[in-house]
């Protein structure tokens, strides 16, 4: 009987552990208020195009982009992605002392309808993916805003 209880406890622990998201599995942003999200056509991996195509400043749009980024899941294995479609620059509000936190630079490969999109930190190699549902909403933000 004791062996069955121990086995049951091990199974429960494995199931609970398998359902947890580890911090390195998703993208992160600074713990600060985002002031603006700027989008530009990408010049390629490792470079940020500063010619802004679209600027998002309303709370709803900023909250959406924050959700897209922080829920994107790290992909396993080698990336076969070519050049990104867009660059994203996350600008944070001024700090209490009047300074600025660094801008977060990301690349986006915008997926087709009902397909995942992919993100990467500008200075990174790891690729993160969104859900198809997120891609559909992301497409409406980016393509309808142009």
Image: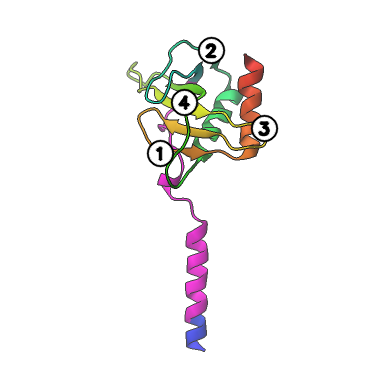
143 in relation to 4, above or below = above
Name the front one of labels 2 and 1: 1
Task: Using the image as rendered, state which of residue 21 and residue 126 is in the foreground.
Answer: 126
* Image position, residue 73 (x, y; %): 50, 43
Is there CB contact under 8 Å for labels 3 and 4?
A: no
Segment tinted magenta in the rendering: 6-35
Q: Within 10 Å of the Cα at label 3, are there few (<14), some (14-19), or many (20+) other Cα atoms?
A: some
Look at 54% across and 15% down and name the residue there: 55
Q: How many marks?
A: 4
Determine which residue is flagged by label 4.
83
Residue at x 67%, y 32% (from the top left corner): 113
- Mark pair 3, 1: CA separation: 23 Å
Task: Mark 2 vs mark 4: give the one in front.
Answer: 4
Return the residue at label 2.
Answer: 53
Q: Determine which quarter of the picture holds residue 114.
A: top right
In the picture, measured across the screen, residue 102 lies left or right of residue 14, that is: left
User: Label 1: few (<14), some or many (≥20) within 10 Å?
Assistant: some
Circle 1 or circle 4, nearest the eye = 4
Q: N-terminal of the two: label 1 or label 4?
A: 4
Q: Earlier in the sequence, mark 3 or mark 4?
A: 4
Q: Which mark is residue 126?
A: 1
Q: What separation in Å lies between label 2 and label 1 (alpha carbons)?
A: 25 Å
Cα gap from disc 1 to disc 4, whole angstroms = 14 Å
**Circle number at residue 113:** 3
Q: Secondary structure at mark 4?
A: loop
Disc 2 and disc 3 in contact, CB within 8 angstroms: no
| Mark sitting earlier along the chain (3/1) | 3
Mark 2 crowd level (few <14, some 14–19, many ≥20, 10 Å Cα): some
Labels 2 and 4: the sequence-earlier one: 2
Q: Magenta span has 19?
A: yes
- Answer with mark 2 or mark 1, whichever residue precedes in sequence: 2
Q: Quadrant of the C terminus?
A: top right
């Amino acid at each position: 009987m004791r062996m069955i209880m121990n086995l049951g406890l091990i199974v429960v622990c494995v199931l609970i552990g398998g359902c947890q998201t580890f911090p390195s599995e998703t993208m992160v942003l600074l713990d600060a208020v985002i002031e603006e999200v700027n989008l530009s056509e990408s010049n390629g991996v490792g470079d940020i195009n500063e010619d802004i195509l679209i600027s998002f400043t309303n709370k709803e749009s900023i909250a959406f982009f924050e959700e897209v980024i922080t829920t994107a899941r790290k992909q396993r294995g080698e990336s076969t992605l070519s050049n990104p479609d867009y660059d994203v620059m996350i600008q944070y509000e001024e700090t209490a002392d009047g300074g600025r936190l660094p801008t977060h630079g990301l690349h986006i490969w915008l997926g087709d309808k009902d397909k995942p999109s992919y993100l990467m930190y500008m200075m990174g190699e790891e690729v993160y993916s969104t859900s198809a549902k997120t891609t559909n909403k992301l497409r409406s933000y980016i393509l309808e805003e142009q």
